[in-house]
Structure formats: C-alpha cells, structure tokens
Image (cartoon, rainbow, N blue to C red):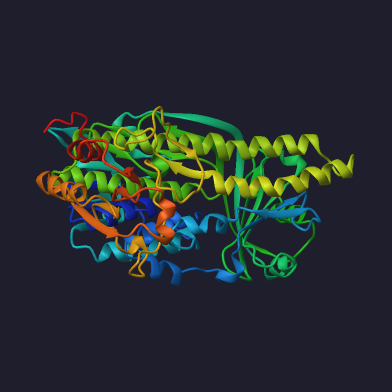
C-alpha cells in the first residue's frame, strides 16, 4: 500500500455532484481529490431536467456554453412536459412543469440533456483545474477519521492496487448506497412506498411520430387509475428516436418474465414499433440522512437524500448541495469562515430536501391518488372534466411556489421565527435568506455578471460611510468582499432596499435601507461566527 497523499478535501464519488463540488473547490484553489469508480459516465438517461438555478451554477463554473452545446433535444422542442390521463394518446392532457414561468427570477435559461452528457462536460472542466487530482476507476473501500483528518482507503478496479488518501475534510457524493455514509456512522430515515420500478431505455421513431400531436414537449407523465397515483413516465433522450420510460411493476418482475413491450403499448394507448435496449429496476422510496455532517465528513447528493424522479428535483438538489458546501469549505480552509459555517450546511440543505420530499414529491403522489379515486370520466364526465381543467392552474402554481430558501439559517439575518423550506414564492424583492433575482445595472450589465467570487455588497445610492465600513471591516477580517455601487433607479427599485449582502452562492445574507446592526457583527455572523465579539 502506497503512502497516504494529502489534500484539503477528498471527494468520494465523481458523478455530477462530486465533479460540481470539485469545480467549486478547485476554482477557489482548494487542494482536492476526486475518487470515481467508473472510467466513463454510465449511459443511462436520467437527471435530464436542469433548472435555471442549476444553469446559474454552470455559468459560475465556466461550463454554461459547453452544457448548452451538449443538449440532445432542440430548445424549440423542449417547452416543458405534459400530463395525460389514462394513456399517452388521451384526449385529456395539460401542460406540466413549465419552468419558463419562473425564468425572470434567474440569470440563465434552463437546460435539458442526459446526466451522462452533463458529467462529460464537468469532467473536462475538472481536467483543467491544477488544484484537483482525479482517481478515476478507483473504489472507496473504507474511511477513517483521526488526528483532525479523514483518510480514505481506495482500490483500483483494474489493477487492485490499494492506496490511502487523506483530507482535512471528506465529502461523500457516492450515491444512495454510500460507503461514506455507512463508514461515518450517519444513519438515514426512509419512507418506503413498497414499489418496484422499471427503467426501460428504448428506440422508437414510431412513438415520435405519434407524439407530434404534442409539439414542443419532451417528457410526459400518464395518470392511470391502475397505478393509484404513481406515474407512467416517458422522456425523450433526443428528438426522434431514443426514449426512456419508468413505471411500477409487480414484485418479482425480471428482465425475462414480463412483457415490457405490451406494457409500453398499453401506456401509450396504441401499438407501435420499438426496440428495448436496456431494462433496469429500482425501489421507489424517499430517504434522507439524519445528518449531512459528522465531524469532518459531509454528505451531498444521493448519499444525503434520494427520492423517485418526480419533477426533476434530484440532480438539481445535488448541485445546490455542492454550491452550498463548496464555498463554505473553502472559507474555513482559507481562514475567513468560522466554526458554525460548516454546521450551516446541514442546517440549510437538509430542511430544503425534507420540504421538497414532503411538499412536492410525495404530495404529487397523494394528490394524484385522490384525483384518480374521486374522478372518472366513465362515471361522471362533467365532474371529471371540471376537475381536470382545474389541475392546469395547480401545476403552474407548483413551479412558482418551489423556491428553496434559508430563512431559518443561523448565518443569515432572516425574519424572526423564519423557517428554511423549499416552499416560497418568486419575487424580485431582496429577501434575506433567499436567492438574489437578476436585474440590469446602469452600465448595461446584469448584476450577476458583476458579482464577486466571495461576498458582494450591492449598494444603490447607499450611505457612502456605511459602504466604506463594510469594505474596511471585511479587509480586517480577511473576508473577500466586492462592492457594486449603482443608482436606485429603474428595475433596481424592484429589490425594495438599497443594500444587499450576497453570499458566494448568490443567496442573500443581509439586506436593508439603513444600517440597523453593527457591520462587524453582520459580517462575522454571515461567515459562521456565532459570537460576534472580535
């Protein structure tokens, strides 16, 4: 066994979340190691719906253009999804997950491409970062914490060579069967729906022709009374040929004892030519680690939380984990982050997932189950059609109300009794604990083009002495702080305040028209120092 290599952060799991975290750290000069078991991304079409917030991450990671070039469905053919009743070719259908409804509140457009294509782009970006070493084709076998460090024992899948690598911190982004989670002693709670699910990957030009009735759509869920609220889900991998499908199947189903073609025909409502290329199975459950942090070990992505692929929440939630954790690790390692900053990762991200699972994913299942139980066009067509018409407004509301925020965090100056949640509302007002909405500056640039890599104080006709105090004290505390000055005019008035302190992940730590607290206390609390004394 070779001598242990030393790093600031070791990341176990180099899927999209792990590679995203490596970029976040590597761009900040943090000495990082990434351990990934697969030589190349697995060609499974999942994690395709990337939100506007996720593409903001890609912008700041320097890969936005490459991600857009890798898309497999033309933008004009990707205007959200479709919900259908009974079969895919039903007369009852409505738009679903129209992300464009919240587009004005984010700097970038959403995107759609298979997870493996996203991973390929992120891997190439990591290759460019001198501060990141990659161990591709290596398995993590065990982890051990001692003497203020965490050591991972890893093994080459091709040669069986074993080596150790050590970090001041270690992050497990190694999936739902996480070696890191188990090795660190973090337990998880689980809501098991007792459903065996199948994932089919298939080719069919005929299905593309059948679905020309729904122009501009790239994913479809079918509500079938037989499924009791669980979806029959179709998604395009490209425009014209390649598809994926997931739905529940009876326990005991294998690749060889079930007629998958007939299942697809029934879900579509018509027989069509197809060629099945892959059959996989998974259990439908929602799980969450009881802590995202144990001493110097952290969890992110599916290692911390997993759920059925309803609504495209999974990969987007994982990327937000990476942004949130990455700048905080860098702050502590660089000496300007306090002891409570790393604790705030669990405090912010875990309640957001709990809310996402409860208020959206499992609520979708229960709401659809109730609808299917209460309404049937064969029994009462008029009542069914009235209820079906009302669903369209509800789906638009879901998109508008999914607004993860950190109002209850100890490192933001949120409202009294604020509670961190995924449920909120999209507005332009600069609210503490919420994502900053973009607006144009008087120089013609978008404010997102001017944000710094550390904290940013946005000052619109603000008291110059107060603004200078922020900069002076930030320099004293060695906190990276950029000042953006502009007039409080035009669209900038929509922020409804003259000073906004923005974190490195574009969430607002503090805002106000006037200074009602000590600048020193504001900056220290935002950087994770509970005791605001100097």
Q: Where is residue 101 in the image (x, y as percent from the top left)?
A: 57, 56
Q: Is residue 54 left or right of residue 128?
A: right
Q: In this view, does 114 lie to the left or right of 185?
A: right
Specify the quadrant of the image occupied by residue 331. Answer: top left
Q: Is residue 131 above or below residue 317?
A: below
Residue at 57% across, 40% down: 361
Q: Is residue 487 above or below residue 513?
A: below
Q: Is residue 203 visible?
A: yes
Specify the quadrant of the image occupied by residue 136. Answer: bottom left
Name the one closer to the observer, 333 or 277.
333
Q: Position of residue 203 (x, y in %)?
A: 63, 66
Q: Position of residue 130 (x, y in %)?
A: 18, 62
Name the one closer to the observer, 352 or 410.
410
Q: In which quarter of the image is the C terminus?
A: top left
Q: How many marks?
A: 0
Name the one closer to the observer, 239 or 327.
327
Specify the quadrant of the image occupied by residue 124. Answer: bottom left
Q: Is residue 44 visible?
A: no
Q: Is residue 173 left or right of residue 352?
A: left
Q: In this view, does 337 lie to the left or right of 299?
A: left
Q: Where is residue 257 in the image (x, y as percent from the top left)?
A: 68, 47
């Amino acid at each position: 066994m070779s001598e242990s290599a030393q790093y600031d952060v070791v990341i176990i799991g180099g899927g999209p979340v792990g590679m995203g975290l490596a970029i976040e750290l590597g761009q900040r000069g943090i000495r990082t190691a990434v351990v990934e078991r697969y030589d190349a991304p697995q060609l499974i079409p999942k994690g395709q719906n990337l939100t506007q917030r996720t593409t903001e991450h890609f912008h700041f990671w320097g890969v936005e253009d490459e991600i857009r070039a890798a898309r497999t469905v033309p933008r004009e053919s990707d205007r959200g999804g479709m919900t259908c009743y009974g079969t895919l070719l039903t007369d009852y259908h409505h738009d679903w997950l129209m992300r464009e409804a919240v587009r004005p509140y984010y700097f970038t457009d959403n995107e759609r491409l298979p997870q493996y294509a996203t991973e390929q782009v992120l891997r190439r970006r990591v290759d460019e970062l001198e501060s990141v070493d990659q161990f591709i084709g290596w398995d993590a076998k065990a982890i051990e914490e001692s003497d203020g460090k965490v050591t991972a024992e890893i093994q080459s899948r091709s040669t069986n060579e074993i080596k150790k690598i050590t970090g001041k911190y270690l992050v497990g982004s190694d999936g739902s069967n996480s070696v890191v989670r188990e090795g660190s002693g973090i337990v998880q709670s689980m809501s098991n729906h007792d459903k065996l699910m199948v994932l089919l990957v298939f080719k069919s030009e005929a299905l593309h022709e059948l679905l020309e009735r729904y122009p501009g759509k790239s994913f479809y869920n079918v509500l079938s009374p037989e499924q009791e609220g669980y979806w029959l889900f179709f998604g395009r991998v490209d425009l014209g040929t390649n598809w994926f499908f997931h739905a529940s199947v009876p326990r005991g189903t294998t690749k060889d004892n079930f007629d998958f073609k007939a299942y697809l025909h029934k879900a579509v409502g018509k027989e069509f030519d197809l060629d099945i290329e892959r059959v996989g199975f998974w259990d439908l459950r929602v799980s969450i680690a009881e802590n995202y942090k144990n001493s110097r070990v952290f969890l992110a992505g599916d290692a911390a939380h997993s759920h059925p692929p309803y609504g495209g929440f999974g990969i987007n939630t994982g990327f937000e984990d990476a942004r949130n954790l990455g700048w905080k690790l860098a702050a502590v390692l660089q000496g300007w982050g306090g002891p409570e900053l790393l604790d705030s990762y669990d405090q912010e991200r875990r309640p957001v997932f709990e809310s996402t699972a409860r208020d959206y994913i499992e609520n979708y299942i229960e709401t659809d189950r109730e609808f299917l139980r209460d309404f049937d066009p064969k029994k009462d067509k008029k009542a069914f059609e009235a209820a079906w018409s009302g669903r369209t407004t509800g789906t638009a509301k879901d998109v508008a109300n999914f607004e993860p925020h950190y109002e209850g965090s100890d490192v933001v100056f949120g409202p009294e009794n604020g509670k961190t949640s995924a449920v909120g509302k999209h507005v332009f007002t600069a609210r503490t604990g919420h994502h900053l909405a973009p607006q144009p500056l008087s120089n013609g640039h978008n404010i997102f083009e001017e944000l710094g890599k550390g904290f940013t104080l946005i000052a619109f006709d603000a008291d110059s002495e107060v603004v200078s105090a922020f900069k002076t004290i930030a320099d004293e505390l060695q906190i990276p702080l950029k000042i953006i000055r502009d007039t409080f005019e035009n669209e900038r008035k929509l922020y409804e305040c003259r000073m906004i302190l923005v974190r490195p992940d574009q969430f607002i730590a503090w805002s106000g028209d006037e200074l009602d607290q000590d600048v020193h206390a504001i900056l220290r609390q935002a950087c994770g120092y509970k005791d605001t004394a100097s």
